[in-house]
């Protein structure tokens, strides 16, 4: 109980810090003196930014946990299965052919491309040695790079490189009221995953095991890919790409609390949100008054953890 209270207090401190850290000063202990501009900054910028960080961090972490359980591989995530790169290709498609499309339409197209790309990678992974768990994410990275190269080619061909780069870099400084609300669609996806967490865990043992226990393997697999693709697309369209988050958070949680998916889902969401909040605040203060995007900080910290995990696993596999 004491640890739970401490976690709640820590999360509350992160939220307050995220709201009140910034170029524009908001008096924390003297709310009665807030001007109209202070209220506007709070409601239109600081609060949306903090909420988007929480939802995006939780969503990407849960998406990583889901695909890791489906494939029984702790090194896979939306970034190493071609999901994010496929969604990027979908966004480039919208930029070229539907330049005036709504945010919902952009998300729908990105979801369709992400769903197809993830499905193709899962089919490809069946022909790879399953015992070598490092090989699958490395092939996934190459698969994603191929798709990403296609997206970059068309973006260059239609002079959209700068637009694509600025839109997908994962910078939360541009989040304002009216631009992030699509992220709320990620919340019901969490409850769907939680409801079927036991099914996803059993599916990781193989198709024969799942069918033997009465689980409709193909339908649940489509559901899992759909949830993964939709949550990744929502975050990508709303705030951009956040690398490595879907790998390191689920692994750190399972290392500390075990591999029971249903138990780990709330913990993964919590630590994913805390991690991204921390990365964003580091980016805001390290070279203040300028900012470094949260995705860059997350990428640096995440890549270090990811390389360490690969080295550790490679040593274990070699021995």
Image (cartoon, rainbow, N blue to C red):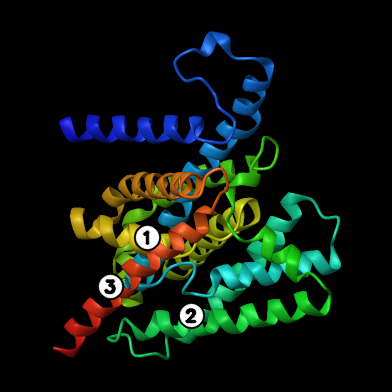
Task: State which mark lies toward you, 3 or 1.
Answer: 3
Q: Which residue corresponds to mark 3?
A: 308
CA–CA distance in space, label 2 to label 3 = 17 Å
312 vs 203: above or below: below
Q: Residue at x 41, y 55 (%)?
A: 61
Looking at the rendering, which quadrant does residue 100 occupy? bottom right
Q: Residue at x 47, y 20 (%)?
A: 28
Q: Quick one: label 2, few (<14), some, or many (20+) residues within 10 Å?
A: some
Q: Nearer the viewer, residue 18 or 146?
A: 18
Q: Residue at x 46, y 74 (%)?
A: 80
Estimate the x, y position of residue 173 in percent, counting from the top left.
61, 45
Q: Which residue corresponds to mark 2?
A: 141
Q: Secondary structure at mark 1?
A: helix
Task: State which mark lies toward you, 2 or 3.
Answer: 3
Relative placement, left or right, of 121 versus 127 is: right
Residue 165 appears in the picture as rendered? yes
Give the label on residue 65, or none: 1
């Amino acid at each position: 109980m004491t640890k739970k209270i401490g976690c709640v207090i820590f999360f509350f401190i992160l939220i307050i810090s995220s709201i009140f850290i910034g170029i524009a000063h908001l008096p924390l202990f003297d709310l009665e003196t807030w001007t109209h501009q202070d209220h506007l900054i709070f409601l239109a910028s600081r609060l949306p930014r903090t909420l988007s960080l929480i939802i995006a961090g939780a969503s990407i972490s849960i998406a990583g946990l889901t695909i890791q359980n489906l494939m029984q591989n702790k090194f896979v995530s939306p970034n190493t299965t071609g999901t994010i790169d496929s969604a990027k290709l979908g966004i480039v498609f919208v930029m070229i052919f539907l330049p005036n499309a709504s945010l919902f339409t952009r998300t729908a197209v990105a979801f369709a491309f992400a769903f197809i790309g993830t499905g193709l990678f899962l089919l490809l992974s069946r022909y790879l040695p399953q015992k070598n768990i490092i090989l699958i994410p490395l092939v996934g990275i190459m698969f994603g790079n191929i798709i990403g190269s296609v997206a970059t080619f068309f973006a260059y061909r239609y002079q959209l490189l700068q637009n694509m780069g600025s839109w997908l870099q994962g910078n939360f400084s541009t989040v304002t009221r009216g631009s992030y609300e699509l992220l709320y669609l990620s919340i019901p996806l969490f409850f769907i995953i939680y409801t079927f967490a036991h099914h996803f865990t059993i599916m990781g043992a193989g198709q024969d095991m799942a069918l033997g226990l009465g689980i409709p393997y193909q339908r649940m697999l489509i559901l899992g890919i759909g949830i993964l693709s939709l949550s990744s697309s929502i975050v990508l369209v709303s705030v951009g790409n956040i690398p490595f988050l879907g790998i390191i958070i689920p692994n750190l949680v399972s290392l500390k609390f075990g591999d029971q998916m249903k138990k780990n889902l709330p913990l993964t969401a919590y630590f994913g949100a805390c991690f991204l909040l921390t990365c964003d605040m580091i980016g805001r203060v390290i070279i203040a008054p300028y900012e470094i995007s949260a995705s860059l900080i997350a990428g640096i910290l995440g890549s270090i953890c990811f390389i360490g995990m690969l080295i550790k696993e490679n040593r274990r596999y070699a021995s």
